[in-house]
Image (cartoon, rainbow, N blue to C red):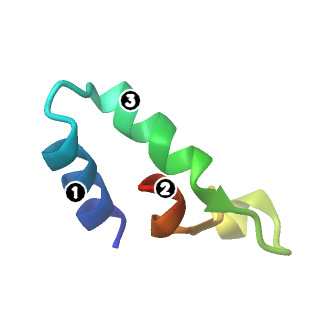
Amino acid sequence: MVSGAAALLLNENPNYTHYDIKRRLLTACSRIKASSYDQGAGVLDIGRIFS
């Protein structure tokens, strides 16, 4: 799912660097009630990326 979202972002914004894509993906995540080791960045909300 994350790689697909990254591909869609790159398709819409071909000048994005890998830093831009990482920033957009991380800001579109919602935390869950787990330790950061268990959840990573959280749950990706693809709708937030493209809104």
What amino acid is at disc 2? Answer: Ser
Q: Taking 19 as reference, is 12 above or below it?
A: below
Tell me the element at label 2.
loop
Identify the residue at horizontal 31%, vertical 61% (top origin).
5
* CA separation in Å, label 3 and label 2: 16 Å
Estimate the x, y position of residue 33 in percent, counting from the top left.
85, 75
Q: Which residue is mark 1?
A: 8
Estimate the x, y position of residue 48 in percent, counting from the top left.
54, 59
- Left or right side of 27 for 20: left
Which numbered disc flags the more N-terminal residue, 3 or 2? 3
Which numbered disc flags the more N-terminal residue, 1 or 3? 1
- Left or right side of 49 for 5: left
Which numbered disc flags the more N-terminal residue, 2 or 1? 1
Q: Taking 32 as reference, is 19 above or below it?
A: above
What amino acid is at disc 3? Answer: Asp
Q: Which mark is residue 51?
A: 2
Identify the residue at horizontal 69%, vertical 70% (top origin).
38
Q: Which mark is residue 20?
A: 3
Estimate the x, y position of residue 26 in percent, counting from the top left.
55, 47
